[in-house]
Image: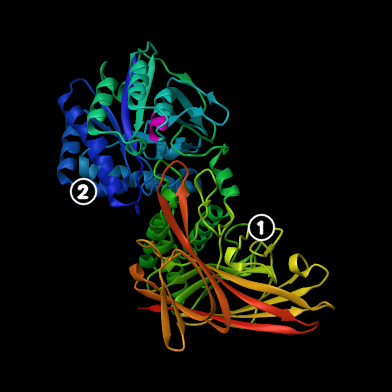
């Protein structure tokens, strides 16, 4: 019988340091200590590059222990994509490059070269076989159990061939993986997890690969003592090296693992493949499309070698896969994780737009919905104007490279917004300056834009868009409303955006095209993704040289003309000014974990509501200005 044991962590850049410390102290260090004392044991280990960097910077002694265990042939490292990218979303060249980057990183620090590829997030594609051959890797570890159809394709190693390339697939034991996942949800106690691992190791099967998810063990609350017990159960009958797999004792059969999303690492109830997640979540689809489009433009530049090298580095950084993944830590709910992605994207934009020998296209379909988005770059701002919603999909302050349009509202399986008074629609991308219409007697302080009966929400309406000037800094968007408060009538909406150095000016014109008077309330909603506050985002209401500080997470105020928000971590100040007084509704949007108590800040919603009365053929103009500047 061949027994392989090991573990892995997929901690990403942008996650809080205590999570790294917890995984080290509660899981990894006790395992390494026991491994150092053991004999005839080989442990398979996959550490994310951010975690290895964390060890190198803060715990060099642990790195020395890892190198010593490798030297004594007790530890085998598993390679993977350097930026934790999802390999199926990468071009073959990029996929092989990132795998080789990780292999080189480990070889320089631990004096060992990996021969095995670990499949991050259990997202598999047959194309990985070709990448393995390019990187001189012999084996690949991935779960062969598809929880969507409850099918295990094989439970022993197989030789898989794809387009003339050959590789050995080592299936991760599903009983162990399922038990660890249940432990992370606190669905089972440690005693049951320990018992399940023991039964698998003591079974009479010809092959067992027991691979532990360190992240799930950490979120389950495992203690160092329990980790030691778990290790003892894993290695009670010894463990083998991957080099011993293809031998006389265990002849390998041919097999094939189709493209799919396997195992239990990721929360994905009802999702059978990764691409289905992108289809259902508009924000994630936009992130992936923005990366693909921007990277294509960047690769088309080939003149200056230094610029090209820098662009290649930024493309690799932007390929990070953790922004799509709802794992044990709900990684994609941390705005700091997405911030690293956006910094790379906007630096690429800035470089390409500043080149005199390159024409950077400003019209692209980033989210592949058949509608073009328009990129506008001024001295200090970068904006993306979208005809869908007639709003801004991105608003980036270039000196800090912070995208204030980076809001996120995941599918219900990943988190809930039930605790909010003004929740957004799950899976719908939130934009800046979206339009809402209410009846004249509607209580705006309690608005819910999911209420289709009482609220006309235009965030998914497609506006007609035209470029207003030759420099492509002004855009006019138009639509007509004849539903909700305007049933039986018709309201024309014209939005004129003017992008200046550090200011977005918006002229809104509402015209009554019907034959009867219209009485209603109009609201424009700004969804601003600020840096996560300690408690709540403070808003300063300004009027006639007087200012009032509001520190509540949710509040409403009447007769507001201007307000100011300080974004302390980015050292910036946002000022919103209107030519007409409005009613303000403000709320900090947080996402509560589906199986936890923690809430993750995503954005701050500001609704500016106006009372409108329009006689036939009359119009009403409103001007808003949003300025971003250094504090």
In the foreground, 392 or 619: 619
What residue sits right under mark 1 in the picture? 451
Q: Position of residue 325 (x, y in %)?
A: 46, 46
Percent x, y of residue 9: 33, 39
Q: Does dot 2 land on a helix, a strand or a loop?
A: helix
Residue 335 placement (x, y as % from top left): 42, 57
Query: Dividing the image into 4 quarters, which one contains the C terminus?
Result: bottom left
Name which residue lies at 51% across and 32% down. Answer: 162
Kindly give the residue lying farthest to the bottom in the view shown. 544
Residue at image coords 41%, 32% = 181
Where are the magenta residues, as a range? 180-184
Residue 248 located within the stretch drawn in magenta: no
Element type where label 1 sits in the image: loop
* Residue 400 x/y as whole percent: 37, 70
Circle nearer the N terminus (2, 1): 2
- Colour approach in the figure: rainbow
Residue 291: mark in rendering: none
Taking the magenta stretch, the answer to whether it contains residue 181 is yes
Side of 147 where 235 appears, left or right: left
User: From mark 2 to mark 1, how far is it between C-alphas?
Assistant: 52 Å
């Amino acid at each position: 019988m061949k027994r392989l044991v090991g573990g892995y962590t997929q901690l990403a850049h942008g996650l809080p340091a205590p999570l790294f410390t917890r995984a080290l102290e509660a899981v990894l260090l006790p395992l390494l200590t026991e491994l150092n004392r053991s004999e005839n044991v080989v442990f398979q280990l996959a550490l994310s590059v951010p975690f290895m960097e964390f060890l190198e910077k803060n715990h060099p002694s642990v790195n020395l222990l890892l190198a010593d265990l490798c030297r004594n042939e007790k530890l085998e490292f598993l390679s993977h994509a350097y930026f934790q990218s999802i390999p199926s979303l990468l071009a073959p060249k990029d996929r092989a490059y990132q795998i080789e980057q990780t292999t080189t990183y480990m070889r320089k620090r631990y004096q060992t070269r990996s021969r095995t590829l670990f499949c991050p997030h259990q997202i598999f594609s047959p194309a990985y076989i070709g990448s393995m051959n390019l990187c001189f890797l012999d084996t690949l570890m991935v779960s062969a159990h598809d929880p969507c159809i409850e099918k295990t394709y094989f439970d022993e190693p197989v030789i898989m061939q794809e387009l003339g390339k050959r590789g050995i697939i080592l299936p991760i034991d599903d009983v162990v993986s399922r038990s660890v996942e249940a432990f992370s949800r606190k669905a089972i106690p440690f005693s049951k997890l320990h018992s399940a691992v023991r039964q698998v190791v003591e079974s009479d099967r010809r092959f067992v690969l027991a691979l532990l998810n360190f992240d799930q063990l950490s979120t389950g609350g495992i203690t160092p003592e329990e980790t030691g017990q778990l290790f003892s159960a894993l290695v009670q009958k010894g463990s083998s090296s991957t080099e011993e797999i293809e031998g006389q004792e265990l002849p390998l059969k041919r097999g094939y693992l189709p493209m799919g999303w396997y195992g239990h690492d990721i929360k994905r109830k009802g999702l059978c493949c990764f691409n289905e997640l992108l289809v259902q979540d508009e924000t994630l689809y936009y992130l992936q499309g923005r990366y693909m489009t921007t990277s294509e433009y960047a690769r088309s530049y080939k003149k200056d070698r230094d610029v090209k090298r820098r662009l290649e580095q930024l493309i690799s950084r932007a390929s990070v896969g953790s922004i799509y993944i709802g794992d044990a830590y709900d990684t994609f709910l941390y705005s700091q994780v997405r911030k690293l992605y956006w910094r790379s994207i906007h630096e690429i934009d800035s470089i390409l737009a500043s080149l005199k020998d390159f024409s950077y296209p400003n019209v692209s379909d980033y989210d592949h919905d058949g509608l073009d988005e328009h990129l506008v770059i001024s001295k200090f701002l970068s904006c993306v104007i979208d005809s869908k919603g007639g709003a801004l999909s991105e608003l980036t302050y270039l000196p800090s490279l912070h995208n204030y349009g980076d809001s996120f509202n995941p599918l219900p399986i990943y988190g809930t917004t039930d605790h909010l008074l003004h929740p957004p629609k799950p899976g719908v991308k939130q934009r800046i300056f979206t339009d809402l219409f209410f009846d004249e007697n509607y209580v705006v302080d309690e608005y819910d834009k999911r209420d289709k009966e009482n609220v006309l929400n235009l965030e998914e309406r497609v506006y007609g868009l035209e470029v207003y000037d030759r420099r492509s800094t002004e855009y006019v968007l138009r639509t007509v409303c004849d539903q909700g408060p305007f049933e039986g009538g018709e309201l024309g909406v014209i939005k004129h955006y003017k992008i200046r150095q550090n200011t977005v000016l918006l002229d809104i014109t509402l015209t009554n095209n019907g034959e009867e008077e219209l009485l209603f309330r109009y609201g424009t909603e700004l969804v601003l993704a600020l840096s996560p506050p300690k408690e709540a985002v403070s808003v300063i209401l300004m009027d006639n040289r007087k200012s009032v500080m509001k520190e509540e997470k949710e509040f409403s105020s009447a007769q507001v003309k201007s307000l100011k928000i300080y974004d302390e971590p980015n050292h910036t100040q946002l000022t919103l000014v209107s030519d007409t007084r409005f009613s303000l509704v403000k709320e900090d949007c947080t996402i509560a974990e589906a199986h936890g108590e923690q809430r993750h800040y995503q954005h701050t919603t500001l609704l500016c509501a106006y009372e409108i009365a329009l006689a036939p053929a009359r119009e009403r103009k409103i001007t808003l200005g949003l300025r971003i500047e250094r504090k």
